[in-house]
Image (cartoon, rainbow, N blue to C red):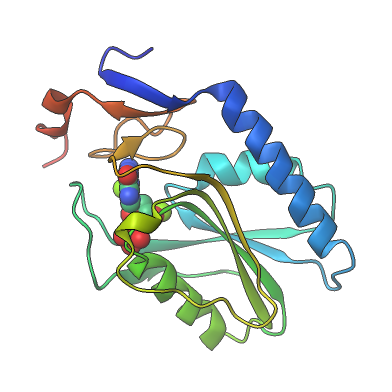
Amino acid sequence: MHSHMERILWNQDQISLRVSELAAQIRADFNASSPPPVVVGVATGAFLFLADLVRRIDLPITVDFVRVESYGSGTESNARPTISFDLKLDINARHVILVEDIVDTGHTLSRVIAHLKSKGASSVSVCTFLDKPSRRKVRFQLVGEGKFYRGFECPDYFVVGYGMDFAELYRNLPYIGVLKPEHYKRSYIS
Ligand code: 5GP
Ligand code: MG
Ligand code: MG
């Protein structure tokens, strides 16, 4: 365990098992989808989850990313996230599976779903690795026949690892955990 960690919530084996289950559900739900679904990751946090997930979805799919600025380098939420980097693919009339690291207040997800809808997606599903329903401030609405998938319900901690950062660090940890309090106080990025 990394010396900055206070505790681990989900280890590599638990993550791997759950990602396989999610991939199997998605495969079953999108098996008949033509054209193939577009998997859209929210950078940067979703990059590891998306990479693990798509390798286990045994279907033709396409992959793209959006970037959303919502948190800065702290742990506080931003009610007005903005899309700072847009899709390359045309998603008009396509089924989109939006992949997120974690849903907290719901502001980011609502913003991205509205964006995908405005670009003509015929459905928007959401696959988030973690979900903190106790922190929700806005309800997001799926588009069309979109489905909601989540890896785990997360207790109300600010977690890091498996793509998720604090001050842009810890994204590469292969597990999800909580930092010791002293490590939430400093930032390497000014
Ligand atoms: P929301 O807009 O739902 O409040 O926040 C969504 C985004 O904030 C997530 O995609 C994630 O990037 C970041 N976020 C929310 N909770 C956490 C957390 O516990 N840890 C980390 N590292 N990021 C979080
Ligand atoms: Mg995110
Ligand atoms: Mg972040």
Is the C terminus in the top left, top right, bottom left or bottom right quadrant?
A: top left
Picture residue at 44% right of the left edge, 39% below the top: 163
Residue 56, percent across and down? 76, 41
Residue at the far front in the pictured view: 134
Residue 135, percent across and down? 30, 58
Q: Is residue 176 left or right of residue 89?
A: left
Picture residue at 22% right of the left edge, 39% below the top: 167
Q: Is residue 54 left or right of residue 103?
A: right
Q: Quadrant of residue 112?
A: bottom left
**Image vertical order of residue 135 relative to residue 165, above or below:** below
Camera sees residue 90: no
**Image vertical order of residue 36 relative to residue 160, above or below:** below
Q: Is residue 176 left or right of residue 128?
A: left
Residue 85, percent across and down? 42, 66
Camera sees residue 99: yes
**Image vertical order of residue 153 relative to residue 60, above or below:** above
**Image vertical order of residue 122 relative to residue 175, above or below:** below
Residue 162, percent across and down? 47, 34
Circle count:
0
Q: Quadrant of residue 82?
A: bottom left
Picture residue at 59% right of the left edge, 27% below the top: 14
Q: Nearer the viewer, residue 161 or 61?
A: 161
Picture residue at 64% right of the left edge, 37% below the top: 18
Is the N terminus in the top left, top right, bottom left or bottom right quadrant?
A: top left
Q: Nearer the viewer, residue 157 or 124?
A: 157
